[in-house]
Amino acid sequence: MPKINGERLLGDLRRIADFGRYQTGVHRPHLSPQDVESRHWLAARMKEAGLEPVIDGIGTVIGKSPKTGPRILIGSHSDTQPRGGWLDGVMGVIYGLEVARALAEDPETAHLAVDVASWADEEGHWGQMTGSRSFVGMLSEADIDKAKHRDEGTPMREALKAAGLAGVPREHLEEGRYRGYLEAHIEQGGLLEAGDKRIGIVTAIVGIMAFRLTFGGIQNHAGTTPMPIRKDAGVAMMRLYNDVMDKFPAVAGPRSVWTVGKMSIEPGAPAIVPGKAEMILQFRDADTRILQAFEARLMEIVADHQKKGPCTVECLNLSRTQPLVMDERFLEAIEESATAHAPDKHVRMPSGAGHDAQVIGLKIPAAMLFVPSIGGISHHFTENTDDADIVLGCQVFADAAAAKPRSSLHISRAPCVAAGVSNCRIPRLRSVSSALSMSSSRRSARSSARRRSQSSRFWTWINSRVLTRRRSPTCLPR
């Protein structure tokens, strides 16, 4: 099996972190000068690795293998959040580069073809997973015409022109080119660390729904308007917020999350009764049924508050992405490799964050691997992962990438249906190589049941441990 070069891997990660370095992290939003410079550096490194790099008209960098036959596509993103971390996204890109090099250097795997991608704008400065959506045909020219920077309002066309990408063709998924897609990422949470695990094998990526709730009241003098006759939009917002927090747990799953991450009150003066208020509610789960239950419960709450008054309530859906179940045979390849390199230090888990894999996975089979985030911190310049875990994750990844193309199995992606993640799995097979010969349904059923039992016990233990471990505020990033 291929042997990755840990020193080379870490060196590339530290070098690309120089583009937009901010304290111990990186500030490299998509199409910023630092981002554009880093993409040209990536393209040069891909060329040195024997790939044929292209920077397309949306900013995605793809290094294409000149070898023939079905390929594995490995990628992630290299843009960052403002003043973000040095590993979020880009680790998966450099993993792809290192896997391509390691496979080429091993005579047993030198024939295997790997394409490497750094998708544009995963962090959403211009849209939602712009690069991967463009690649699979979900982004039109009209969408690009309308796209503006979320903070500055700059048209995307202007930014593309400034980056030298005006008129450059966009790359698109070529039918039959890929056996599947692999993506590695830091966990961006603390569950692996809390559970003393070093590898997370991602079973599914959560679906996400977001709603804007707008409350209309009557703006008036705070000193002369009696409480009983007020139509205070701020109070109406907080009442609905409390209702959501009280009623959502009844329909939630064990790993459901919901967040009100933005609130605003107008005009926002201490002597004025607010005439308008707004909040954005987001909820996530890997089970379609639970997402549907959340949405139905929200509509019930909104209707009830609208009926009771005294303020009006409008509810607008801002976005909805469906959960995606990862390809089981890819998961088996990762699990087999993790068992070899990190016995008892790996676990199957869903991803609570969105990733490009859930877009690419709509078209071709996909799977993901996580490595631990120290302190569970991400989207902050203090984000970090132990060097040993970075290297281990890449070796597990390389072995999985090498194992998959050598199988002649037809890859079938499990659809994410209303039955949810647990019911979407096919029975576990002990290894990729044994999949061709293993036919006993009783044996695979026992294995599947044992894995579900082990996973259930692990997550029950994790939940109890996380709930009882209270971090001091001094542990949080300043």
Image (cartoon, rainbow, N blue to C red):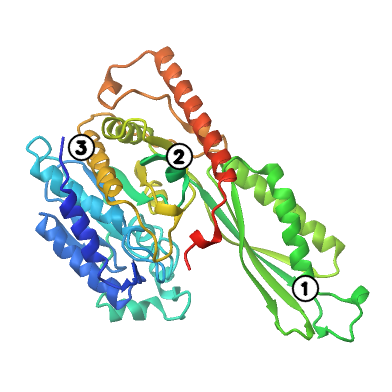
User: Residue shown at 92%/79% (left/top)?
Assistant: 226
Q: Mark 1 highlights which residue?
A: 233
Q: Position of residue 218 (x, y in %)?
A: 81, 80
Most foreground residue, 129 or 91: 91
Q: Is label 3 in contact with label 1 (beta carbons under 8 Å)?
A: no
Cα gap from disc 2 to disc 3, whole angstroms: 28 Å
Up-down relation of residue 256 to residue 240 (above or below): above
Q: Earlier in the sequence, mark 1 or mark 2?
A: 2
Q: What amino acid type is highlighted by mark number 2?
A: Gly
Q: Which mark lies nearer to you, 1 or 2? A: 2
Q: Mark 3 highlights which residue?
A: 402
Mark 2: which secondary structure?
loop
For residue 416, side relative to residue 374 (left or right): right
Label 3, residues with CA under 10 Å away: few <14, some 14-19, many ≥20:
many
For residue 471, side relative to residue 97 (left or right): right
Q: Position of residue 401 (x, y in %)?
A: 24, 40
Residue 87 numbered mark, or none: none
Q: Position of residue 114 (x, y in %)?
A: 19, 47
Q: What amino acid type is highlighted by mark number 3?
A: Ala
